[in-house]
Amino acid sequence: MRDVVITGVGLVSSAGEGLEAHLTALAGGSPNTDAASFEPFPVHPAVTLEWDRQIPKKSDQRQMEPWQKLGCYAAGLALDAAGAKEDADLKGRMQLIVSAGGGERDYAVDGQILTGLRKADNPGVFLNERLMGDLRPTLFLAQLSNLLAGNISIVHGVTGASRTFMGEESSGIDAIRIARERIASGQDDIFLVGGSYNAERPDVLLIYEMGGFLWKKPYTSVWERPAEGGGMILGSGGCFLVLESREHAAARGAKPLAAIAGVASDRSRRQPGSVEGALHGLSRQLGGKPDVVLSGATGIKGITDEERAALKDIAPGAAIHATGDLVGHTMEAQAPIGVALAAGLIAGGGLSEALVTSIGHWRGEGAIRLTKA
Amino acid sequence: MALRDKQGRPLVAVTGMGVVTSLGQGKDDTWAALTAGRSGIHRIERFPTEGLRTTIAGTIDSVDVEPFCAPMLSERLAMLAAEEAVGQSGLAPSGFPGALFIAVPPVEMEWPQREALAEASGQGDEVTYKDLLKAAATGRFKPWHDLFIFGTVADRVADRFGTRGSPISLSTACSSGATAIQLGVEAIRRGETDAALCIGTDGSVNPESLIRFSLLSALSTQNENPEAASKPFSKNRDGFVMGEGGAALVLENAESAKARGAKILGYVLGCGEKGDGFHRTRSSPNGMPAITAIRQALEDAGVSPEDIDYINAHGTSTPENDKMEAMSCTAVFGERMANLPISSNKSMIGHTLTAAGAVEAVMSLMTIGTGRIAPTINYQVPDPAIPLDVVPNVARDASVNYVLSNSFGFGGQNTCLVFGAEPKGA
């Protein structure tokens, strides 16, 4: 089996743009939170980005909604960081795995239709007419899950082949898992892997509010939320990683930040204790002794406490950072962001091993072990 | 016979298949209808169609789910197909000894749910998302969180069949079903698992999804005679017809399949894929990505173009796809393409979108198993620009050992699979 290393990180979120900005924010400071726009739901809003820098064509920008733009932008940063941006041949054989949900809706149109439906003589016909008349044709392409990958292919020329994984937090872990396995087995040499999330949209808040998962008070650390009922604060951001075999990186003179020593994921039937047990199991699969943990903890009651308890056993003495306290909960992008930060910390020196966790808010448990490159 | 391929990887056998389409439940019913040249396309009765440009589809109306919505129907279709496939394989009906790879349509809350939330909010004037959020806070709609997140269909299928590990839900648009199979093949070849349950499912014919495709001018508007609307490769083709379906394949390491005495229905010999960065909905004018995907699939299978006996086309009936597919196949197969049978199941079941690659994989293997090629129906006006043997209108008997199945999708997705009765040189 071949070693798999990370040679590029592209990261944008409420904490800024680029790996350095995030490592600085991780070292201290308070998270960037917007409590007003979606009151009573705080969100961690993406910083303002100059889209032109990674998505040069306005025509491309117009075809995308924010979740795709965040992802496309982060993908461009990752390619830059890996020294791959200008290498058309390399990008032409670079494989792409994206973890994604779906895209934004036209909220004004939805509201108008819901208002009109109540008074409509024939609601079905009214719905047809309004959707036919009011939906922007290209909005569909901004909603389709696999079109983040499609846009990355178009904008950045990454055209080996793309696959899009769905399924909330698990998709982020599994995207990295499958990419790593394909590289380790020799099937492929180089991947761009990651995801993005736009939290600043009422339709996703709606889904998680229906389930009772959202934190509705001022920002508090994920670890402290369970005592007050628990809940997650969604965050906007995007993160892509360039993964390749050690040999491939060396051959093209790319400097690895860290190695991905293992990825483990599973689904437990959630009941009290199952998350704690699952984390112990994943940790046994991965082995090692982490110096630092990048936890994807959500702040949800029960599972957050169980993760904390498990980490005490799995990573005694390790510094524990919650990515949720830095960038919020970015759903499909949460695991890639944890890996990006872990790679940055290891590359910065002093640490030799990191553990990234991703306990889904509702299902799915995963962990990733990073070591010095 | 060696149970490894020429590259030393485990051979991947198919030991179970299941399918449900608008033509019937079960692969035998569907296959009988397909080879009889029967269409499953009909007028939509599920919702009012006044004001729509397209009023026909290959919906599956015989399956009831509650609440009626795309994720529930997609889940049910996946379950039906997987029950048939796992049943045929002879593996335990629960406690499946391997991983799940499932292509599911992207889901979101639908209009009946939005309306219920609006109603529950008590807002008598202009409704906004603020009102919906207020209703959501009551906790009365908790089950809809689970229903409308992306990982739920996979989770429920994994529960039902007891598959191992974290299930993969995926989308590569209209090639998703093929990608699910490809992921399973790769996992077996890498030795991570000896078995994989690979599923494609799509039950998403609802007003908004139909309108979205309609606004992209992707759908046929030839509503007068629903059964005749999907006419792949014909000169008067004018778009695809949406269809619903589910298909499942049990893939196994051939060695472990033989060891347990399973009947092998055929092999997935090769997979090929290539991205396209040309445009969001159109393919590169030179056809390079599709051509590369086909060549890669043949190479991966260890076969040459001359070995392929039949192509199960993507054949959507859109002006663009059929032209590009014909061009790409001709580039790979050369002059032989004039006589190499290529037919489109979509002429009868419509485009089952996320499920299509898996449905057509099952049909490709049925072709190998029965020695019969399903036709392309509605082929009355040949397109002189596409001089292919599309097996027009009537099924044909033929000895078929190797099949190429094409799947292409929005977002530059091109995935091709090669199936065989036996590996080459066996």
Image: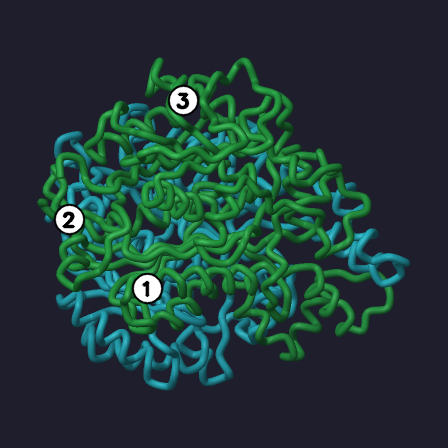
Chain colours: A cyan, B green
Asked if labels 1 and 2 touch by Cβ distance under 8 angstroms, the answer is: no
Task: Look at 64% across and 65% down and name the residue there.
Answer: B68
Judging by the rendered image, the residue that carries numbered circle 3 is B328
- The image quadrant of residue B72 is bottom right
Q: In which quarter of the image is the N terminus of chain B?
A: top left
Q: How far apart are marks 2 and 1 (CA)?
A: 22 Å
Q: In which quarter of the image is the C terminus of chain B?
A: top left
Judging by the rendered image, the residue that carries numbered circle 2 is B10
Judging by the rendered image, the residue that carries numbered circle 1 is B166
Q: Is residue A333 visible?
A: no
* Sequence-earlier tag: 3 or 1: 1
| Image location (x, y in percent) of residue B102 | 40, 56
Query: In the visual, does A124 lie left or right of B395?
Result: right
Up-down: is A264 above or below B219? below
Query: In the visual, does B115 lie left or right of B153?
Result: right
Q: What element carries label 2?
A: loop
